[in-house]
Amino acid sequence: MPNTKCSGDMEDCVMPVRSANPIRARSLIRDNLEKQAGCLNLIHSRMPNIKVFSGTSHPDLAQRIVDRLGIDLGKVVTKKFSNLETCVEIGESVRGEDVYIVQSGSGEINDNLMELLIMINACKIASASRVTAVIPCFPYARQDKKDKLSGGEEKDESKKLAKKNFDWKFRSRAPISAKLVANMLSVAGADHIITMDLHASQIQGFFDIPVDNLYAEPAVLKWIKENIPEWKNSIIVSPDAGGAKRVTSIADRLNVEFALIHKERKKANEVASMVLVGDVKDKIAILVDDMADTCGTIVHAADRLVEAGAHQGGCVYAILTHGIFSGPAISRINNACFEAVVVTNTIPQDGHMRDCPKIQCIDVSMMFAEAVRRTHNGESVSYLFSNVPY
């Protein structure tokens, strides 16, 4: 069979003129053309068939993610009508694309959640191949279960007081709002969820779609080793019993000791008493928790650690995945005995850092970017559970 040789700046290629198998001939021609076009950056970009859109809750994180991926943010316009209804317009085709929508559960949470649902649905009915919601801070994660208390007579005076105050955490009829959010995301059309440090791991079970719950732990370990010179003389402390598993994991990887504080609440956002379990005397205390809202818990915990003689009463760190910092949080941190309060940027922190010089931020955009890349390419994301991508 006669062949035609081609040469030049590109690599030599063989172009079949005639073939007994025309399908194979067309395949060879297409392969050669795609190879040449790839050299000229005309056909394939670094990540084909992927679109990343940002909601209004955290555009900075979304921009960092696409910068790491080497692509551009998708075009989307979000606006509100005069009656405050949310309107979303996707500004480019998503037909057959692998779509990722970045929206964190911060700021005006209800509006941002509704915006995310509308964006998911808009992409789904526009024939997107797959829609993944990237939710760095999952909204309503603290409403993950009903309380133990039920109707009937209570002998415990504290439980009577709780019922009398109609505290939502002590009502047996409290909603499981995290499950409701999971249902809404699924019904809107989400095919996959990527989030970080869920308040309760059982929230993954609320979904009938895949959920990748990333961990800030690798980034936290890296920060501790790089920024606390005497970290080998530290002790990792959980401000409540629920975080014991989290701090033991970090303590094991650092090969240091751990402690925990048992707290009792009179009502939501108010801590009644704290009992320290563990010896923190003359050690650098590092409080670790998944989130801080009004910061009452970590401030009381820091005071308790200082009373117990943590590093001669002067060096307490707090490391949190989600720094919500609502209400009196900033003033409490400013007046507390913290060396530093370290948070990730799952929630925008620029304003908080301006108001409080003690707050420092760990960038976790590379973890989300790598999770997006691996998900798009069909690779495992379990590497990210114990490593920080570079």
Image: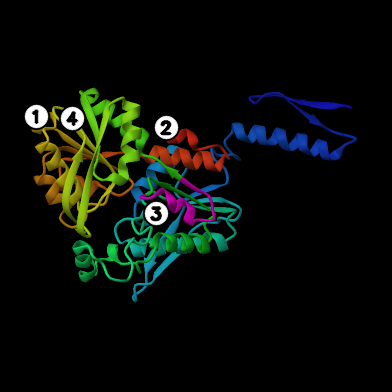
Q: Earlier in the sequence, mark 1 or mark 2?
A: 1
Q: Relative to residue 292, is residue 235 depicted above or below?
A: above
Q: Which mark is residue 103?
A: 3
What residue sits right under mark 2 in the picture?
386
Q: Earlier in the sequence, mark 1 or mark 4?
A: 4
Q: In 3D space, how far apart are the residues under numbered discs 4 and 2 (Cα atoms)?
A: 24 Å
What residue sits right under mark 4 in the picture?
284
Q: Relative to residue 13, is residue 321 depicted above or below?
A: below
Q: Where is residue 229 drawn, in percent x and y?
A: 21, 23
Foreground mark, 3 or 1? 1
Residue stretch in magenta: 199-212
Residue type of the residue flagged with mark 4: Ile
- Using a 10 Å C-alpha cutoff, classify the residue at mark 4 as few (fewer than 14 neighbours), some (14 to 19) or many (20 or more): many
What residue sits right under mark 1 in the picture?
312
Q: Where is residue 57 drawn, in percent x and y?
A: 34, 55
- Using a 10 Å C-alpha cutoff, classify the residue at mark 1 as few (fewer than 14 neighbours), some (14 to 19) or many (20 or more): some
Q: Where is residue 272 drawn, in percent x and y?
A: 16, 54
Query: Considering the image in quadrants, where does the C terminus appear?
Result: top left
Foreground mark, 1 or 2? 1
Q: In 3D space, how far apart are the residues under numbered discs 1 and 2 (Cα atoms)?
A: 33 Å
